[in-house]
Amino acid sequence: MEETEKSSPPEELLHGLKLSDQKSSESTGPLTAGSKDAHHPRSLDRGDLHSSTQEPRAADECFHDCNDSFEVKEPGMEQERDNREDLARKQTELDEEYLLELEKNMPEEEKQKRRKESTKLKEKGNEQFKKGEYGGAEDSYTKAVKVCPACYQKDRSVLFSNRAAARMKQDKTEAALSDCSKAIELDPNYIRALLRRAELYEKTEKLDEALEDYKTVLEKDPSVHHAREACMRLPRQIEERNERLKTEMLGKLKDLGNLVLRPFGLSTENFQVKQDSSTGSYSINFVQNPNNNNR
């Protein structure tokens, strides 16, 4: 099957190739093609890119780590693979409204059959997760998402949240965040997905967003101790972060001011900044001899 595709590739795969390249690829056998690939690793990457965008996401997740070990590492390779994964995710996980439209005429028996299949895949993913097989668990949850009918929104919400947990264990932070948001979109009252997203926001220094999620959790369930503790802790951290950023900004402005004032025999020491404790506003006063004032 693979050799047939090489001898008569689709029209879009020939874009940018010369006619001579096509003829040479047809005239050479598998051994010659293999030798050519060994001398030109980038051509292999290009082939991987086309195949990964056409295959289902599950296959991509199963094999891309193994494939990476044979690739020649070049600048930008990691970003290229991330882009391929994002594209595959967009192709396989379509908009929920669009999926609902596609399933409008699906028989109820078929929906129930698919739901049972997705449940089995979810349970398989849960077992893999417990064993620490996070990549396998992610793959099982992905397959379950593809099978589960869009009409079962809470089921799909759980699947996205579970996959987020598996991706968190693999430090796939942005993908995990996306899954959490999808789970919350499908079920806004899903506490576990909200907590996971809040944890990811906090991990990526998005403290304001994390605080909002923790507040939402407390509004829905005041008994969640972790959310209450975070709501007490994060405001102080946010204030400290803002003060740190303010200090860094003032330091940079001071350096810039000294650079501008130096030709005139002045420095930022000639300008005293005072903060009004009652209003928090700042005032600037010019001082002719700042060193004399310190005596």
Image (cartoon, rainbow, N blue to C red):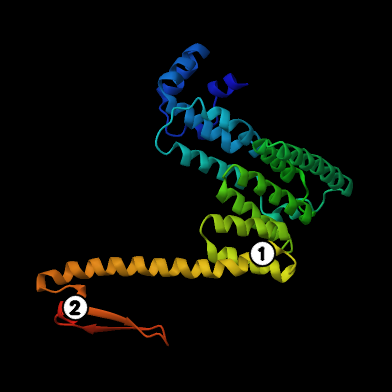
Mark 2 and mark 1: span between their CA atoms? 48 Å
Q: Is residue 271 visible?
A: yes
Q: State left or right for residue 86 relative to residue 137.
A: left
Residue type (three-letter) at the residue carrying disc 1 = Ala
- In the drawing, what numbered circle is on residue 227? 1
| Percent of width and height locating residue 161 | 69, 51
Q: State whether residue 212 appears in this view.
A: no
The disc at residue 270 is: 2
**Front one among 31 and 144:** 144
Q: Which SS class for mark 2?
A: helix
Which numbered disc, 2 or 1, marks the residue that appears first in the sequence?
Answer: 1
Q: 10 Å neighbourhood of mark 1: few (<14), some, or many (≥20)?
A: many
Q: Position of residue 286 (x, y in %)?
A: 20, 83
Instruction: Tell me the element at label 1.
Output: helix
Q: Quadrant of the N terminus?
A: top right
Q: Using the image as rendered, state which of residue 209 and residue 221 is in the foreground.
A: 221
**Residue 233 vertical position relative to residue 138 in the rendered view, above or below:** below
Which residue does the image show at 52% across and 69% down from the upper left?
Answer: 236
- Which quadrant: the C terminus? bottom left
